[in-house]
């Protein structure tokens, strides 16, 4: 199968307009005849389901939480980008486009990114109209901040709870449609398989997480908005229920998985404190605006930080990157933290942490200013670590945070399975090899509010969709497969918990497919993963009933999928012998140890086709061409 | 540390529930409360027993999924803290703690510590929004919003919908939850158009769902992990009476 991105012709700035005009439409009176399944209620899913409901489609909305409002998007803190140029500081659609393509290290599709930048301005308008309480200036205008080292202030925010407020806005719109009867909200439900009829996505198999029953739903199209796969690494900043299951099962049905090795590691998280730890907490990136990152000069230093004199400290980011200093991009900051810890200069009990020090900023600006800027973050830090960052430097360490890879989609957000569309973090489309801060919320809402209403109509109007009922053979077959897997999980009756095995898998991935990857480490992981999978199916313990609420059973199913998915992730990392964005190959460095991209050989999207568990997937390439932003090597020196 | 737990176990909504004793061994002070329960559950799973069902997702105090009573207090003893953010250093070796689900007529127990909070969704469904479709929104700066109004709206909007307010209230009222959304919208210009219909519909739905009425005890405010003040309830009451007086449509 050749991968056709279906990017429309014409000049970049006119593509989306032109495409909207050339797309087919569904007559308003006919829309209610179409049933659309939307899996997931994060920013992408909630915005898609509510918009489609408003247009008059018959929408079924699923999520695994007990309410759509609790999707993982709720946890986003920092903000959402938009090229409004309200600050008159030189921003524009083209600049946001340019920054995103460059930040993504030239591994994203120009046309998609341009559309995203165009739509960013409409998102803010929509959210304001919904009553999202964005931060304001005294004159009543919307406030902005600069985020993640951006040179313009284009980030809109609602205190440290931007994701929460945007999600509640979308959720409330969704609830309005539920009241109107266009959307049916089905929480506490997990999609466990995709149903194909005549090669088209026509339904899903769902497990009701309260009753344990399997349910079948038929539709004319399916939208996956199920988030990223960062939790494959066990410890991450993601919600503990985030998972790869929906994407993975769709992949097994024929949806290609694109660039799984592009994972983002966030440099400022609270370090791991013990083996019972279940997640890592992000400390906002904004801390690096005032905090200075350092480690002791000498390995094995034992003195507490306040007793280490200046001359024995190494402010390694300021030293190596004089022009960007502590504000280098996420991937660079993370990799450098790992490097100094590998040299034995890490701090804290585990030696896996670096200091983020506010002493100078407090001296310069005063305690009150620092409290005003970061008070809530400092409190959160104190709550978790029992240390006072006003007196002692924070200890931070990188953690898995976001996944740029995901199911392959074309310009219409449709996967390689006709009718299966993928939105939000679950797709691979807009962030290339590295995502910029405050751009995930933007993408999720752009996909759901503004892209899918057009591209889905185009699909529906242009396809033959014979009536399908849930009694169709394909539903029976898919349900039997899901039931079979559940029965197998319950039947093992071993002695190891899903969590133990997940934690082991996470450690293998973190050590070998983490911040720096080499052929040797990747081969180690490829040897370990099948062994872990074997161990899982021989020795996992899943007690309790299947036809009842059983969280451990849900979890076991997700771990089973990570154990299959991890292999593709690693294979992708192995095949991409260049360093780019969040993917750093030890073999591909410049003489001074920076990432070395290889445009000649790797300027493409790697889309993997499933061939069977444990079998090497087939690689398909979508070449990337850059007409408007000329690829250059990133430099932050 | 070692902690002795008395946990409510109930297999299904209509099964008989009872307290069961567990001992959490090797508890480190750095663990969160839920991580301590994870460890208890790990042991149960290895022994082939059904682990204690409890809900959680973000584990950083923002999604509102977690929540149960810790020795009679919703989300446990730390003010302004969800149970996922509660840390074991707060407790002493050898302590005895009782864990129970939220108890309220409108929140049915589903299993152990997990309850059905879908009534909250239905309250929002009744009117917790502005009725604007995607598409025609004016520019974000077309309507100015004073910083004070927007900050206050944000204070109310910070509600995470966990249900602690209901569990703590002797009337099992959801007045704090309902009033937080009504206040947010009433404070913002965008919420004005439907101001009166909204409050009436939401309050009526609140009552229909089986939540009790507010008698100003203030227990809700005391346990709210986001410290949402009961002044929201006073505002809701004012809004409701004004709506009855002035609403003509
Ligand atoms: C701590 C943190 C802070 C962040 N801060 C920012 C920020 O400041 N700015 C920014 O732009 N980005 C930020 N991000 C990234 C951003 O939050 C996410 O990328 C984004 O919210 C993802 O949205 P989504 O709609 O794609 O998926 P999610 O919000 O992850 O939603 C996934 C949905 O799918 C459902 N689901 C999953 N699997 C299944 C299944 N099998 N069956 C049924 N339903 C399923 C879930 O129930 C959920 O409703 C942050 C991320 C984290 C972890
Ligand atoms: S798990 Fe999200 S608030 Fe506790």
Image: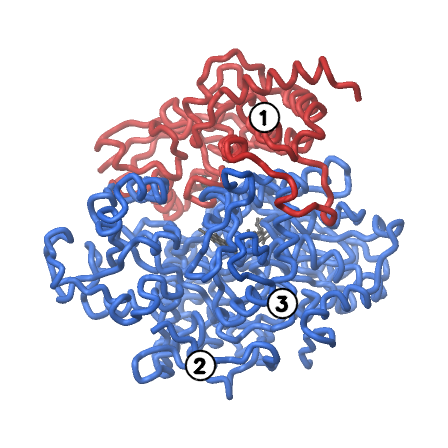
Chain colours: A blue, B red
The reply to whether the residue tagged 3 has its Cβ within 8 angstroms of ligand 1 is no
Mark 2, residue position? A597
Where in the figure is residue A570, as x and y percent of width and height? 45, 73
Q: Is residue B197 above or below residue A366?
A: above
Q: Residues within 10 Å of mark 2 (few under 14, many from 20)?
A: many
Mark 3, residue position? A114
Q: Secondary structure at mark 3?
A: helix
Q: Residue at x 37, y 72 (%)?
A: A636
Q: Is residue B81 above or below residue A288?
A: above
Q: Residue at x 78, y 68 (%)?
A: A198
Where in the figure is residue A205, as x and y percent of width and height? 67, 54
Q: CA distance from mark 2 to mark 1?
A: 53 Å
Q: Are the two marked residues, 2 and 1, in contact with CB atoms closer than 8 angstroms?
A: no
Q: Secondary structure at mark 1?
A: helix
Q: Residue at x 50, y 67 (%)?
A: A564
Residue B110 relative to residue A20: left or right? left
Q: Earlier in the sequence, mark 3 or mark 2?
A: 3
Chain ID of residue with mark 1: B
Asked if residue A272 shows in the view, the reply is: yes
Mark drawn on residue A187? none
Mark 1, residue position? B178
Judged by depth in the image, the label closer to the viewer, 1 or 3, is 3
Q: Are the two marked residues, 1 and 3, in contact with CB atoms closer than 8 angstroms?
A: no
Judged by depth in the image, the label closer to the viewer, 3 or 2, is 3
Residue A393 relative to residue B238: left or right? left
Name the one closer to the observer, A299 or A391. A391
Where in the figure is residue A60, as x and y percent of width and height? 72, 47
Q: Residues within 10 Å of mark 1 (few under 14, many from 20)?
A: many
Asked if residue A487 shows in the view, the reply is: no
């Amino acid at each position: 199968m050749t991968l056709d991105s279906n990017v429309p012709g014409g000049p970049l700035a006119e593509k989306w307009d032109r495409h909207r005009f050339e797309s087919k439409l569904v007559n308003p009176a006919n829309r209610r005849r179409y049933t659309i399944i939307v899996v997931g209620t994060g920013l992408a899913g909630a915005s898609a389901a509510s918009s489609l409901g408003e247009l008059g489609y018959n929408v079924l909305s699923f999520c695994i939480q007990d309410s759509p409002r609790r999707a993982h998007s709720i946890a986003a803190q920092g903000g959402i980008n938009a090229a409004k140029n309200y600050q008159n500081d030189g921003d524009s659609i083209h600049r946001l486009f340019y920054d995103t393509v460059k930040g993504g290290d030239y591994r994203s599709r120009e046309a998609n990114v341009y559309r995203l930048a165009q739509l960013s301005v409409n998102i803010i308008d929509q959210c304001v109209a919904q009553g999202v309480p964005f931060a304001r200036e005294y004159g009543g205008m919307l406030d902005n901040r600069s985020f993640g080292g951006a040179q313009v202030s284009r980030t809109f925010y609602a205190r440290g709870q931007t994701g929460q407020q945007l999600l509640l806005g979308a959720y409330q719109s969704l609830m309005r449609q539920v009241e109107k009867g266009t959307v049916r909200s089905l929480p506490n439900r997990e999609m466990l398989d995709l149903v194909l009829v005549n090669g088209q996505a026509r339904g899903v198999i769902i497990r009701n997480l309260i009753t344990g029953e399997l349910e079948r739903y038929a539709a004319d199209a399916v939208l996956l908005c199920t988030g990223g796969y960062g939790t494959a690494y066990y410890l991450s900043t993601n919600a503990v229920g985030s998972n790869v299951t929906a994407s993975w099962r769709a992949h097994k049905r024929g949806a290609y998985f694109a660039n799984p090795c592009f994972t983002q590691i966030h440099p400022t998280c609270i370090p791991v404190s013990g083996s019972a730890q279940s997640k890592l907490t992000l400390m906002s990136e904004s801390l690096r605006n005032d905090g200075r990152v350092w480690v002791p000069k000498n390995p094995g230093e034992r003195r507490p930080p306040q007793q280490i004199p200046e001359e024995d400290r190494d402010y390694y980011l300021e030293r190596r990157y004089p022009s960007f200093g502590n504000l280098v991009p996420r991937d660079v900051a993370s990799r450098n933290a790992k490097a100094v810890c590998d040299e034995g200069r890490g701090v804290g009990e585990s030696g896996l942490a670096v200091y983020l020090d506010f002493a100078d900023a407090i001296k310069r600006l005063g305690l009150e200013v620092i409290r005003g800027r970061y008070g809530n973050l400092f409190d959160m830090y104190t709550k978790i670590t029992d240390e006072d960052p006003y007196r002692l430097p924070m200890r931070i360490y990188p953690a898995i945070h976001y996944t740029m890879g995901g199911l392959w989609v074309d310009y219409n957000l449709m996967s390689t399975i006709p009718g299966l569309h993928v939105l939000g973090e679950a797709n691979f489309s807009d962030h290339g090899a590295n995502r910029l801060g405050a751009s995930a919320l933007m993408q999720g809402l752009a996909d759901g509010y503004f892209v899918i209403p057009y591209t889905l109509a185009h699909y529906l109007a242009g396809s033959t969709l014979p009536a399908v009922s849930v009694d169709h053979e394909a539903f029976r077959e898919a349900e039997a497969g899901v039931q079979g897997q559940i029965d197998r999980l319950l039947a093992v009756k071993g002695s190891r918990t899903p969590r133990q095995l997940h934690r082991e898998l996470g450690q293998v991935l973190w050590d070998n497919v983490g911040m720096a990857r080499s052929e040797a480490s990747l081969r180690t992981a490829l040897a370990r993963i099948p062994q872990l999978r074997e161990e899982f199916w021989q020795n996992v313990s899943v007690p309790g009933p299947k036809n009842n609420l059983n969280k451990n059973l849900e979890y076991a199913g997700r771990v089973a999928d990570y154990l299959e998915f991890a292999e593709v992730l690693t294979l992708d990392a192995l095949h991409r012998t260049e360093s780019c964005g969040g993917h750093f190959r030890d073999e591909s460095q410049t003489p001074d140890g920076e990432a070395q991209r290889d445009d000649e050989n790797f300027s493409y999207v790697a889309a993997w086709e499933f061939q069977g568990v444990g079998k090497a997937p087939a690689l398909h390439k979508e070449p990337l061409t850059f007409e408007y932003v000329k690829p250059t090597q990133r430099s932050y020196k | 540390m070692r902690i002795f737990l008395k946990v409510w176990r109930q297999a299904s909504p209509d099964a008989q529930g009872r307290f069961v004793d567990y001992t959490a061994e090797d508890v480190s002070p750095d663990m969160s409360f839920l991580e301590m329960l994870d460890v208890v559950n790990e042991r149960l799973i290895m022994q082939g027993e059904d682990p204690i069902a409890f809900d959680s997702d973000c584990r950083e105090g923002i999604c509102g999924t977690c929540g149960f009573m810790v020795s009679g207090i919703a989300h446990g003893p730390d003010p302004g803290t969800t149970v996922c953010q509660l840390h074991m250093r707060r407790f002493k070796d050898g302590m005895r703690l009782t864990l129970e689900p939220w108890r309220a007529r409108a929140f049915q127990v589903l299993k152990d510590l997990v309850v059905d909070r879908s009534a909250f969704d239905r309250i929002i469904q009744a009117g917790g929004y502005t009725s604007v479709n995607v598409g025609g929104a004016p520019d974000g700066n077309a309507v100015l919003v004073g910083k004070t109004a927007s900050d206050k709206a944000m204070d109310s909007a910070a509600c995470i919908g966990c249900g602690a307010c209901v569990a703590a209230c002797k009337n099992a009222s959801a007045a704090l939850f309902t009033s937080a959304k009504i206040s947010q919208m009433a404070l913002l210009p965008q919420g004005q158009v439907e101001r009166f219909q909204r409050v009436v519909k939401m309050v009526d739905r609140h009552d229909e769902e089986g939540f009790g009425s507010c008698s100003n005890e203030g227990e809700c405010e005391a346990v709210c992990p986001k410290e949402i003040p009961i002044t929201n309830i006073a505002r809701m009451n004012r809004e409701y009476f004004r709506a009855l007086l002035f609403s003509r449509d």
